[in-house]
Amino acid sequence: MTSGIWYAIGAYLLWGILPIYWKWISHVSALELIAHRIVWSCLMLGGLVVMSRQWKPFTAALTARVVRLYALAALFIAVNWFTYVWAVNTGRVLQASLGYFINPLISVVLGVMVLGERLRPFQWVAVGLAATGVLYLTMTLGVLPWISLTLACSFGVYGLVKKTAPLGSVHGLAVETAILLLPAIGYLLLLELAGDGAFFRTGVLSAILIIGTGIVTAAPLLLFASAVQRVPLSQIGLLQYIAPTMQLLLGVFLYREPFARTQLVGFAMVWAGLIVFGLEGFLTRSNQHLRFSDS
């Protein structure tokens, strides 16, 4: 597999176990956690930019167009962060996982319609299986899954923006968090002045975990940003089923959220689509390698 595929797998594995981390600090409100994620991520990424000795070329690349592009990315990732943390900390891990099952389909559609990417016949079969499973899962909920749809659409558009973004993964993410930094700091200061901030009032371990939100936020996003610049968005989209599958297992077996047998049918269709996509890609690469060897 290419390095981009490994970057994507690493990102999705980390995202898959993130509900455990957010549950550890579920006593902190979702909006406050998002503000801390922005602040600590920005500090960490800024440090990486400075240590790489690329500060001057980095600032020189920040044209008005580049800043607007990353401001759009920052908006969508902020919406995604808030919705996800709120869902996990209010006992909706399964709804969050459904959102990330839907998201790969959004990525595939965007890759085909906006970027002109093409899918091979069996890749369309894989997408069809996954889409059928997602539709079935949505119908079993009985209501419009707004949490899932918000997560899917916000991260799908974020991935599209990152695909067309000109900066490297570290620099791009540094710009996104820097754009959100002042509002985040302002909100945290207001909380402290009102006596409602959790950072100085919930113990040392809690404060350490809050600071750690910068690492658990930046690490998978850096891997994701590196991946989308190396492989087609349609492939990124279907690999993303790794994360929601892990979240589903956590929601059912660790947090004991209700999971009806009828839902298993929908998830099985999604997993079948992922298996078809993976096998198709493996066989295609094997055939190409054989043809290259014969020539």
Image: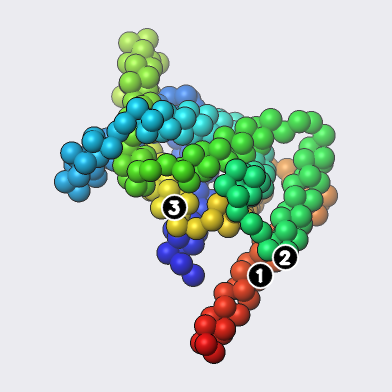
Determine which residue is flagged by label 3: 229
Query: In 3D space, how far apart are the residues under numbered discs 1 and 2 (Cα atoms)?
Result: 7 Å
In the image, is 176 to the left or to the right of 286?
left
Give the structural element (helix, strand or loop) at label 3: loop
Q: Quadrant of residue 156?
A: top right
Badge 2: residue crowd in 10 Å (few <14, some 14–19, many ≥20): some
Are the residues flagged by discs 1 and 2 in contact, CB closer than 8 Å? yes
Q: Earlier in the sequence, mark 1 or mark 3?
A: 3
Sequence-wise, the earlier of marks 1 and 2 is: 2
Q: What residue type is labelled 2?
A: Phe
Residue 122: mark:
2
Q: Please, what secondary structure does the residue beneath circle 2 have?
A: helix
Q: Separation of disc 1 and disc 3 at Cα? A: 22 Å
Query: Of the residues shown, which amino acid type is indicated by label 3?
Result: Gln
Q: Where is residue 232 in the image (x, y as percent from the top left)?
A: 54, 56
- Of residues 232 and 261, the one nearer the viewer is 232
Q: Is residue 25 visible to us here?
A: yes
